[in-house]
Amino acid sequence: MKKITKEWTVMLVTFLLASFACSFFASPATPQPEAIYTAAAQTLEVQLTQTAFAGLVASLTPPPATSPPAEVSPTFTTQPPTVTEPPTPLPPSPTNTQVCDQARYIKDVNVPDGTKFAPNQTFTKTWRIQNTGTCTWSGYSLVFDSGDSMSGSASIPIGTVNPGQEVDLSVNLTAPSGEGKYRGYWRIRNASGVLLPVIGGYQGKSFYVEIRVVLPTPTVVASTGFDLYSRAPEAQWISCGSPCTGGTVLAFGGSDSDPNGFVLYRGGYQLEDGSSPAKILEMHPMWVDDGVISGLFPPYTVVAGDRLRAKLGFLAKADGTCGVGNVRFQINYKEGGSLYPLGSWTDSCDGNLINVNIDLTPLAGKTVQFALVVLANGSSAQDWAVWVNPRVEP
């Protein structure tokens, strides 16, 4: 387009210059009216031609360059369609796998967790188990796995159990001797020695027994006491000389003239202090110098708070006065084949009785045999030694 415009411009300039040169070099003449009109017409024609040419040029000249309009983002009059994500495919449904050896814990038949037992107490624990596998249990065993065995057998045959069948499995146990909580784990073992998994059991492996060992609460036993006076006929009576070797067995209630000594009741007799109590037990040693008489009573279990009480002295003579008796009273006890002293008193007839009151609490819980002893100090003449109401009481 630029090349065409240039060529037209050159042609127009050339034409104008040629016209101008002709008019410039022509001889002046007197203009005629027709000539004036002709010249005017030509001048107008030239102007019109120039005007037309200028319009032509203007039409052929391209408009000035302008900056391109800014890019405008398109505006949507409607919402774009919603894109739907394809659904996530679901995993395939699991397929049940048949298991040959498998068990299920059903419940504790007895001995719930935390059951209390005394030390060394025996008991039987039973679990209910189901065979949830496809194989029949034959040659299977209940076996100890870990924890506290409580003296249970290491392996116990189960017997035949079909698939789906429930069975009660039991084991004999003994509570430990120490106080505290104990737990033992048990499992089922097949004939090949493989341990079965247990659904519902402990960590899918085993089932267990859990107990508490507690010390028994001490039972407070009320003392029934022990009446040595009334049980004197049950005692073993022996007399001997000095030194005392062998000895002579005496019958209770024998003759008061027996030279081997005697033991009998003297209720209502007058004593050296002038009293005449109802419960008097006389013990006379063998009729020799330093003679001895003793009585060993049946066993008695001492209770805390027990006390051994009695009064010691002599029978008075018929006129109420004292004789010449002189002895040593002793109270001993026998335990486990050995003899131990509880008290000893030397006395002569002086008009007074000796009051005995011994606390037996140090012997509480022990089963002992009490022994009453009278030893002559020298001559045994008039050694009419007596025990007034000897007894053990709370």
Image: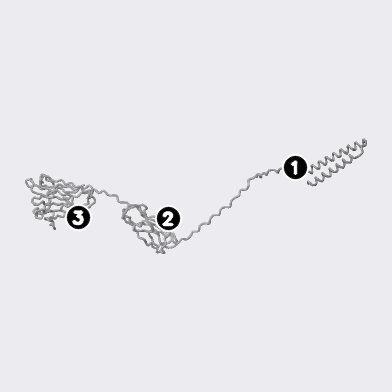
Rendered location of residue 213, percent (x, y)? 33, 52
Q: Which residue lies under the disc numbered 3?
A: 338
Q: Is mark 2 on a helix, strand or loop?
A: loop
In this rendering, position of residue 137 left or right of residue 88? left
The colour style of the image is one colour
Rendered location of residue 389, percent (x, y)? 15, 48
In this rendering, position of residue 33 left or right of residue 13? right
Q: Which amino acid does label 2 sit on?
A: Gln
First in residue order: circle 2 vs circle 3: 2
> Is any atom of residue 371 visible in this view?
yes
First in residue order: circle 1 vs circle 2: 1
Q: What residue type is labelled 1?
A: Pro
As measured in the structure, the alpha-carbon distance from the residue carrying label 1 to the one carrying label 2 is 91 Å
In this rendering, position of residue 33 left or right of residue 71? right
Q: Is residue 390 above or below residue 24?
A: below
Q: Nearer the viewer, mark 2 or mark 3?
A: 3
Q: Which residue lies under the disc numbered 1?
A: 64
Q: Which residue lies under the disc numbered 2?
A: 203
First in residue order: circle 3 vs circle 1: 1
Residue displayed at 83% across by 44% down: 10
Crowdedness of circle 3 by 10 Å Cα count: few (<14), some, many (20+)?
A: few
**As rendered, which of 17 and 303 lies closer to the eye?**
17
Q: Do the residues labelled 2 and 3 touch (CB within 8 Å)?
A: no
> Is any atom of residue 115 visible in this view?
no
Q: Which amino acid does label 3 sit on?
A: Ser
Q: Is mark 1 on a helix, strand or loop?
A: loop
Rendered location of residue 300, percent (x, y)? 21, 52
Q: Is mark 3 on a helix, strand or loop?
A: strand
Q: Are marks 3 and 1 in contact (CB under 8 Å)?
A: no
As measured in the structure, the alpha-carbon distance from the residue carrying label 2 to the one carrying label 3 is 59 Å
